[in-house]
Amino acid sequence: MLAAYGLVAAGLLAAAGCARPSVGSDRDDPTAPVTLTFWHGWSTPAEVKAIDDSIARFGKRHPNITVKTVGNVSDDTMNQALRAGGGDAPDVVSSFTTNNVGQYCSSGMWADLDPFLAKSGMVKEKIFPKTLLDYTRYRGRQCALPLLADTYGLYYNKDAFRKAGISRPPRTMSELKRDAVKLTRRTAGGSYRQLGFMPNFRLYQNSPDRLFAQWGPRYFDRNGKARLADDPATKEFFTTQRALIDAQGGYGPTEKFRATFGDEMSSQNAFLTQKVAMHMDGEWRGLMLRAAKAPFDWGVAPMPVPDDRADTYGRGYLTGTVAGIAHSSRHQNAAWELVKFLTTDTDQVVAFANAIHNVPSTNAALASPKLDADPEFRAFLDIARNPHSTALPPSNNGAMYVTSLQDFSYAVEAGKVPDLDAGLRRLDARIDADNLQSEN
């Protein structure tokens, strides 16, 4: 039960750069009582209960390790504590922001986990899907492991589809535009009653990087330089998104309609209130639609793909929660036991995934017969398994390059970028300048 606990020596950790020389080791006796602090970002009652249940399961295996959990912790709060160090800093950390993994790894704030994996005899490439593994490491440093994943798909109103004479969800971008127009309904006065698909980037989960994933973009070259302007897919992506807006009435009218939508997580969510007939969202939305007793028949499908990439249909955008060990922890071996249990134990990963309706993050858990059999949920499992699905690449400036992309995208959809090629070159220059500043 405790065989792996205490196997990683402080000298190995220090040599690997996991921790400062004065920290990172536990007592020699692996059965001695240890108290860990685990910081996480979950906050709803159901999520907190799922975490508490997970910790209880861990405690049965490791009765000498007490885990104190602190929930609803933001990345900023966590980073401040890790920089300050001291007794108030956590031992085990988690984050919803995979974009920040590059920062965690390059700064050394999160310990390198490769020595722990090696001592436990674990081959990470066999345990985790490649895309998920890629977003938990940076330039060879594995400072985090996947702790469930999020996948994005297309929710669609089956009743609205039947009324519009549409037999199946769209598979290509041209079909998406065609169906969006058919599904758009107006009042007698000409205002919107229902929009087929709201493509505007400020809506809920419509961050541009998520729709852009359907093109399989490469943000950086092998030297870490931004290459968005060099990739024809980037211009095609923005042109397609603008065409979706224009086909349904233009940016001004659709933005005005968006202002009438309720809060994303409320009973006034635009898809739930049938103000949109198709909607990009994550796997958790299905659970919320059932809890709210949605008054219409709905389904889930992969997001459409570009017409010239029809063979990649089934792909989607992947992100998720990551977990790691704080570099300043004085109980890193015990912390590894908790991280290992939460991220690699198949029964635990499946139980946690079922409890909060997130996608399992290991190959074994994805194949487990104990997974929720809900067909809509399983549609997201298929997206997660699809070899064409992609995640954002880690960067040493964290999520700054995504913020730059968002700002640029808002300007493009509003018609404020007359020369898209020139604008993309400026975007690349801005991303490169931010990366250089982070390195210095």
Image (cartoon, rainbow, N blue to C red):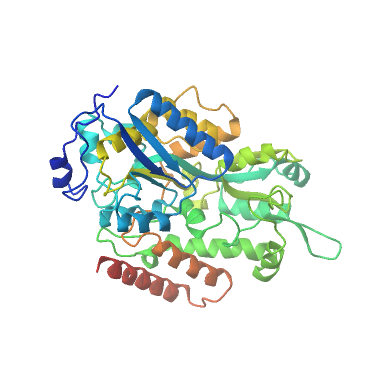
Q: Is residue 113 among what the camera can see?
A: yes
Residue 276: percent from the left, percent from the top? 70, 53
Of residues 239 and 328, the one nearer the viewer is 328
Residue 27: percent from the left, percent from the top? 20, 34
* Farthest-out residue, right: 188
Residue 415: percent from the left, percent from the top? 57, 74
Q: Is residue 366 among what the camera can see?
A: no
- Residue found 24% across the figure and 69% down from its top: 440
- Residue found 66% across the figure and 63% down from its top: 247
**Residue 436 against residue 221 in the figure, above or below:** below
Of residues 402 and 329, the one nearer the viewer is 329
Relative horizontal placement of residue 202, taking residue 402 as reference (left or right): right
Of residues 61 and 158, the one nearer the viewer is 61
Give the total of numbered labels: 0
- Residue found 46% across the figure and 51% down from its top: 73
**Residue 192 against residue 414 in the figure, above or below:** above
**Residue 3 against residue 132 in the figure, above or below:** above
The quarter of the picture where residue 174 lies is bottom right
Residue 354: percent from the left, percent from the top? 53, 31
Position of the N terminus, as image quadrant, is top left
